[in-house]
Amino acid sequence: SPTAPFRLAAILSLIALTVFAAPRHVYLTWQGDTSRTITVNYQTLEPTETSTVYYDTQPRNGRHADYRYTASGSAHQIPGLTDGRKIHWVELTKLTPGKTYYFIAGDPQHGFTAERKFRTVPSGAESLRFVVGGDMGISSDGADLLQQSAKLSPAFGVIGGDIAYANDALTNYTKWDVWLDHWETNMVTPAGYTI
């Protein structure tokens, strides 16, 4: 049919917009008790006013209405960075030690991250594996190092400095983008846990 190419182009455009709109640079940090809290960090390029994480102890395949828990956080923009991105922090609290949680971040209007999972740190006297490093940069060697670290299935990673070699210059923000992409993609254990 003559309208088939038009429909295909329209569908591909919608898919491209959805992919572009989805939050990016998802990483986890701590603000408090390492066994009962986690902070989900992510960035958006759209002017969203909400910072939301939907989470559960069971996978929900990214369907935000199916998650049992929701947490809200805050966002800010970096002064002088003209692309309008927002950096979001959402702290999840009252978690169970040593438990697996599944989550998505974002909002229905601008899109969500893919479903990811993490495991809280046990609170007892169990052995704990973690990785420590620094001087990473944004080369493929840094990405390879992250992949090798993730194969060890650490509970977390500690980075001692000289991370993206952006030299505290706002004009080097793309170096941070590359570094965060490397972390988000490569710091995932063989069992699929975000480190």
Image: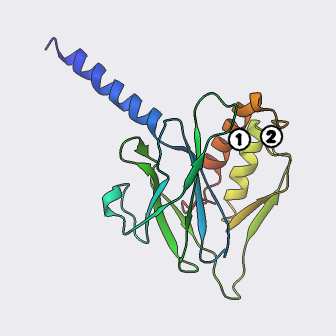
The one of 80 and 141 positioned closer to us in this rendering: 80
**Disc on the earlier residue, 1 or 2:** 2
Image coordinates of residue 26 in percent, x first then y, are 58, 50
The local crowd at label 1, few if under 14, some if 14 to 19, many if 20 or more residues have their Cα within 10 Å, is many
Residue type for callout 2: Gly
Horizontal side of residue 121 vs 48, given as left or right: right
Count neighbours of disc 2 (C-alpha within 10 A) and say few if under 14, some if 14 to 19, many if 20 or more.
Answer: some
The residue lying furthest to the left in this view is 1
The percent position of residue 63, horizontal first and vertical second, equals 33, 55
Q: Position of residue 35 (x, y in %)?
A: 63, 77
- The mark total stands at 2
Query: What's the image's color scheme?
Result: rainbow
What amino acid type should be assigned to the residue bearing mark 1? Answer: Trp
The image quarter in which residue 16 lies:
top left
Residue sitting at the far top: 2
Answer with left or right where residue 69 lies relative to residue 79.
left
Where, quadrant-wise, is the C terminus in this rendering?
bottom right
- Does residue 36 sit above or below 76 in this rendering? below
For this view, does 42 lie left or right of residue 1? right
Q: Are marks 1 and 2 in contact (CB under 8 Å)?
A: yes
> How far is the residue under mark 1 from the one under mark 2?
7 Å
Asked if 4 appears above or below 78 in the picture, the reply is above
Residue drawn at point x = 71 percent, y = 33 percent: 173
Q: 57 and 148: which one is in front?
A: 57
**Above or below — where is 83 with respect to 97?**
above
In this figure, which residue is indicated by the disc labeled 1? 179
Residue at figure coordinates x 55%, y 73% from the top left: 93
- In the displayed structure image, the side of residue 65 where residue 50 appears, left or right: right
Q: Which quadrant, please, contains the N terminus?
A: top left
Residue 127 appears at what percent x and percent y? Answer: 72, 81
Tag 2 residue: 137
Q: Secondary structure at mark 1?
A: helix
